[in-house]
Amino acid sequence: MPKRDPFKYFHSSPEIIRLAVMLYVRFPLSLRNVEDLLHERGVDVSHETVRFWWQRFGPMFASEIRKKRADRLRSWPQWRWHLDGLCQRDGA
């Protein structure tokens, strides 16, 4: 069964939605600040729309980032676990 498109019924492009969510999550901006930044770029959305996008797509974007980060770590040829140099001694 093919994957459903999560952006199917939205009028904005996936790139705009991803930009709005990433601006809100990555930088210490309020929803209204994200609204203002998008307005300066010619995208007219309300802060409530940004909040809805964040609630709906935020977990999906976060899981994509985690998956990419884990895949990148595993792709290194010399990938292995390293132990910390600290140890605890009895009686010290």
Image (cartoon, rainbow, N blue to C red):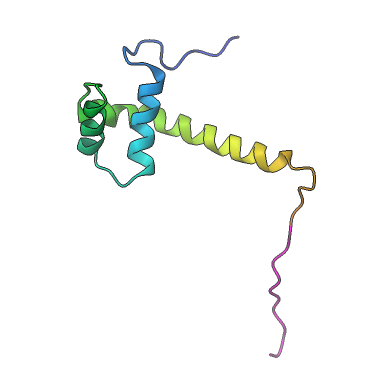
Position of 85 compared to 55: left or right?
A: right
Q: Residue furthest bottom?
A: 91
Residue 55 in view of the camera: no
Which residue is nearer to you in this view: 1 or 25? 25
Q: Residue at x 69, y 79 (%)?
A: 88
Position of 55 compared to 59: left or right?
A: left
Which residue is nearer to you in this view: 76 or 6? 76
Question: Is 90 part of what is drawn in magenta?
Answer: yes
- Tell me the quadrant of the picture where the N terminus can be found: top right
| Residue 84 image-quadrant placement | bottom right
Position of 45 compared to 27: left or right?
A: left
| Residue 44 image-quadrant placement | top left
Residue 35 location in percent, x, y? Answer: 22, 31
Question: Is 85 part of what is drawn in magenta?
Answer: yes
Q: Main secondary structure of the magenta part?
A: loop
Identify whether 89 is placed above or below 14.
below
Position of 32 compared to 73: left or right?
A: left
Identify whether 25 is placed above or below 87.
above
- Tell me the quadrant of the picture where the C terminus can be found: bottom right
| Residue 8 image-quadrant placement | top left
Magenta span = 82-92
Residue 2 location in percent, x, y? Answer: 58, 10
Identify whether 21 is placed above or below 5.
below
Residue 15 in view of the camera: yes
Q: Residue at x 44, y 33 (%)?
A: 59
Q: Residue at x 41, y 16 (%)?
A: 7
Residue 52 location in percent, x, y? Answer: 29, 27
Which residue is nearer to you in this view: 36 or 52? 36
Residue 73 location in percent, x, y? Answer: 67, 43
Which residue is nearer to you in this view: 70 or 39? 39
